Structures are given as structure tokens and as C-alpha cells.
Image (tube, rainbow, N blue to C red):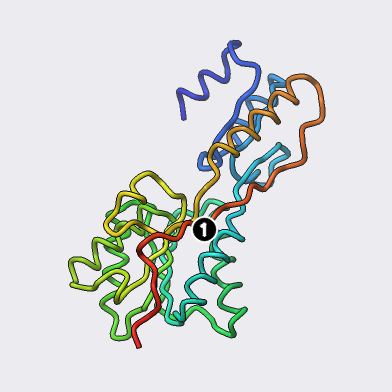
Amino acid sequence: ASACMRLLRSDVIDGAIVLETLDLQPFADVLGQQEAPMVAIGYAQSLALHAIHADDYRGTLGAMQHLLALGHRRIGVLGSVLRPFAVEERLRGVHAALAGHGLALEEGMLALGDFSIESGEQAGHALLTRSKRPSAIFALNDRMALGVMRAARELGISVPGELSIIGFDDIPMAAMALPPLTTVRQPGFALGGAAAQALFALLGGDAPPPAAVVPTELIVRGTTAPPQP
């Protein structure tokens, strides 16, 4: 972040596209002083700036509805100790999908990681060793979902025979997993293109396009199936 701030304080850039995973306030302050526009890929974090983000809420809603349509009712969730706005939207989608079927997230069925494979393995192990383990787990990103797959292998739980798993992002490793991971695809190319268009509009003195919410896509692969009777 310090290298980014040094670059922003120089006179070599006219504007910036910043990822929401960073704290946006320092960037907004520096660029505001220089009257240089900034576009965020992610959520605006209550700042007065243009933001482009994926539809995390509807993406999660679709993933959860997929599990519910397969017949799953005991669904575990891997959340995150890191709480960017996207996490809040994905958790909102979890609760909305369950509520739509007259359900609620059961106590003890939310485990927390830090978006890494290792934390997903640890949190997955905690969920899968419960006396009443989930028949499906939705992880808020693919790396944690891959960690759950690792935990299931260590515990001798077959995927998707005994456990269904869904991730979020569709990173390259998702398609290469064994079995390939069902996930929600983040529209990275569309997000980058929309952010660039907005920045060019601001640099040209034009009003940028309206803040964009880019649709996600459920990619059904080999880690989801109906629960065992």
C-alpha cells in the first residue's frame, strides 16, 4: 500500500482504479487533493466515488438455491474474519435463500476463515466433525472451498456423495480440483472493462456511467449432488 501511495502522490498518473479489498479512504484523500478521479472495483465504502462490483448477493442467492433445490437442508457456511462489503452481501444472500424456504442458519453452522485454503481446511474440519454435520457447505470464496475438500478427504467423506461444496470466484484452481468445484463465477473481465470505461469518462470530464452491478454466473461442476437419504 505504501508503494501505491507514493505513486499516487507523484505526478505521473491522472487517475486510478483501486480494488475494494484495500482501505479506500487514504487513496480517496490523496486523489481528492490532486483532483484526480478514482474508480473502485468493489464497494464504495460510503465514500463519494464511482464503484463497480459483482452482484455478490444474487450470486450467493443462486448458489444457495442450487443446494436447496438438490434437497439440502443442513447447510454449513464458511464466512470470513475479514469483512469487506462483499462478505456482508454474500452472507445476506445466504440468509435470504434460507428464509425463502422457511429455514434459518443453524447455530454452529457458520465457521470463519481468512479466505485461505488452510483456513478453509481448519473451518471445514470443525463443521464436518460436528455430531450432526452438514450435508452441504457454501464457502464465501474458492480457496476456502478447496480447503473444505481437503478436510473432507482427510475425514474420509466423499464429495459429492456425502458432502456437496460450493465456492465463490471461479479461480483457475476451481476447474482443476478433483472433483471440479461448483462455484459462482466473478465477472473479472466485465468488472475491469466497466471500471476502465468509467475512469476514461471521468478523465474526459464526462459523467461516468451509472454505478454498475455486474451479474455473476453459477458454474455447476462436480462437487454438488442431492444429499444421501
Which residue, as the protein is rendered here, is positioned at the far top?
11
Depth order, front residue of 64/122: 64
Location of residue 53 by image quarter: top right
194 displayed left or right of 145? right
Label count reads 1
Q: Position of residue 110 (x, y in %)?
A: 42, 71
- x 58%, y 18%: residue: 9
Say if 166 sits above or below 6 in the image: below
Report the amino acid beneath label 1.
Answer: Leu
Q: Position of residue 28 (x, y in %)?
A: 64, 32
Q: Position of residue 152 (x, y in %)?
A: 25, 68
Q: Position of residue 37 (x, y in %)?
A: 69, 26
Say if 127 sits above or below 3 in the image: below
Which residue, as the protein is rendered here, is positioned at the far bottom?
229
Depth order, front residue of 84/131: 131
| Element carrying mark 1 | strand
Say if 130 sits above or below 224 in the image: below
State which quarter of the image contains the C terminus. bottom left
Which residue, as the protein is rendered here, is positioned at the far right?
206
Location of residue 8 by image quarter: top right
Depth order, front residue of 38/31: 38
Residue underneath mark 1: 218
- x 62%, y 37%: residue: 40
112 displayed left or right of 8? left
35 displayed left or right of 142? right
- x 28%, y 85%: residue: 131
123 displayed left or right of 12? left
How busy is the neighbourhood of tag 1: few (under 14 within 10 Å), some, or many (20 plus)?
many
